[in-house]
Image (cartoon, grey):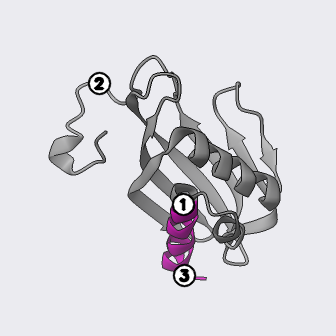
Amino acid sequence: MSPEIHVDVVLKYFDGCNAGDVEALKATLEGDVVHYFLPRAHRVIRGSEHLANYWRKFQQVYKPQWKIDHTIASGNEVVSEWSCAYTLPSSGDRMIFRGTEWYVMRNQRIAEVRAYYHYDESTDCQLGDFPYADRGYLQK
C-alpha cells in the first residue's frame, strides 16, 4: 500500500477522535489494535471497541481539538506530530499538550499506536520557546 493511503487513515482516525465518533474510529482500526501510552498512568488499550470508546469518553469529558501538524510515512508505518487543545472539566480552563505517535498499519487500518507525550493538567505541555504560532500550529 502507498504511504499516502496510510496517512489518510491516520487523519480519519483523528477526525474520529475530534468527533468522538465510535463507528468512524473503528473504521480506521484493526480489531486487535493495541495503543501504548508513554505516561504510565495510562494503561495499554487493546481492541478497536475499547479504543474507540476510550476516545469517545475523552471527547465527552475534555472537548479536545486535535490537529495533526506533520506526518511522515514509509512502508507500513506512519509518524505524526500532533497538538491537542482541551478543556479542564474542573476549572473550564483551556489547555494544550503536544506529542508524537508511531502507527503500524495493516490492511489499510491502524494495528498499533505508540504515543509519546508529556501530560500535566497543571500546565501546558509543549516545547519551551518553540515558535508554535509562527509556524501555524494549533493554539488554545
Q: Quadrant of the C terminus?
A: top left
> Where is mark 2, residue-wise?
128
Above or below, comparing residue 95 to residue 106 in the picture: above
Report helix, strand or loop for mark 1. Answer: helix
Q: Is residue 7 magenta?
A: yes
Above or below, comparing residue 100 to residue 48 in the picture: above
Residue at point 60% right, 63% down?
A: 77
For the magenta stretch, what is the residue range? Answer: 1-16
Furthest residue in direction bottom, as rendered: 1
Give residue 68's quadrant in the image.
bottom left
**Front one among 19 and 72:** 19
Closer to the chain start, of discs 1 and 3, is 3
Identify which amino acid the numbered label 2 is placed on.
Gly
Report helix, strand or loop for mark 2. Answer: loop
Within 10 angstroms of label 3, few (less than 14), some, or many (20 or more) residues? few
Residue at point 43% right, 60% down?
A: 71
Q: Nearer the viewer, mark 2 or mark 3?
A: 2
